[in-house]
Amino acid sequence: MSKPQVTHYDDITRVRLHMAFPLRWVNSYMLRGEDGWTMVDPGPRSAENEAVWKEALAELGIEMSDIASIVLTHHHPDHYGLSGWIQQQSGAQVWMSRAASEAAWRGWGTLQDESAPSAWTAEMIALYRQHGMAPERLDQLPEHLGSFLPQVTPQPEISVIAPELPIRFGGRWWQPIETGGHAEGHLSFYEEQTGLILCGDAVLPRISPNISYGPGGDQHPLRSYLEGLRTLGALNVSKAFPGHRDPFESFTARTTQLLEHHEDRLNRMEALLREQAHGATAYAICVSLFGDSLGIHQLRFALSETIAHLIELEDRGRITRTHAEDRFVFHVVEAD
């Protein structure tokens, strides 16, 4: 992407930002309002993306000082990362949900480099060790988690969005809808009059958002995600503007597909456990599903998603766990 990819959809402008493989790019949206421009999810911080924004703003004919607000769907670095830097350049307010701001601080506020792992890093390592991650993979985590620090520095000052109250930006009134599972306090923004929705990573076309279990967060993330899909699927959406891939119209159908996908994944995990006479760790199930050649970034996503699904199976009474030698081992509950 040598030049900023700026695409106009009536009153909403998309700017594509660079991010790591396999997604490669993330969407930010620009909306013009009475008090200036609003930027939704400015992307991860990097020199490359700073340059993209300078070129994109020039193409749009606006200055940093014209940005009145930055609205964040959630705290993940590819959405949240540049918000502090742009706030410093523009003086814009940065808005997100309270739960998302707390997750941002828990994950990024005390994050240090690999030479001095943070408490959050230590908790992640302990969690993955309990679920059977191989020692050589655990050793890769401090450097991997520390690598996010440049993407989210500096931290922004946050103004909190109340999910029950409409918020005005870009010359429109939006209803914030908070859903969990992918990220704590994730907000989508729905305009009932037109049926438009800025849905972040809550619903994505063609790919399934990662559902992750992590320390200090939602203890039942897949349950939260499925409930959120049902809430979002009940809306009368005409067009969805997602965090990744292109805007799309078949929003309700996509929520149904994602619900079915996770039911299939639950059934597949239960079947894999049934093949193990003595049970299996989440890491063993993860490797069975996704293979053992993933890089540490994708492996962390895959294991966190596996744990989330196993917890949901546990909640439904379909599996149980034992604790042996500092490891959790999951077993199928046989019908009477």
Image (spheres, rainbow, N blue to C red):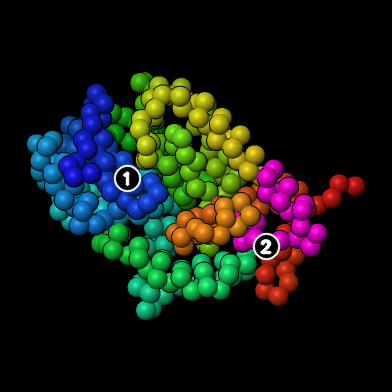
Give the main secondary structure of the magenta stretch.
helix
Residue bounds of the magenta highlight: 267-286
Circle 1 residue: 25
Left or right of 205? Residue 262 is right
Left or right of 193? Residue 284 is right
Near-viewer residue (201 or 104): 201
- Let me know if residue 285 is in the magenta part: yes
Tag 2's secondary structure?
Answer: loop
Near-viewer residue (194 or 149): 149
Left or right of 42? Residue 289 is right
- Residue 224 in the image, given as x and y percentages of width and height: 57, 44
| Residue type at the position of mark 1 | Trp
- Residue 139 in the image, given as x and y percentages of width and height: 49, 74
Residue depicted at 72% across the width and 48% down the height: 270
Quarter containing the N terminus = top left
Circle 2 residue: 281
| Residue type at the position of mark 2 | Thr
Residue depicted at 46% across the width and 69% down the height: 141
Picture layout, residue 44 above or below residue 328: above
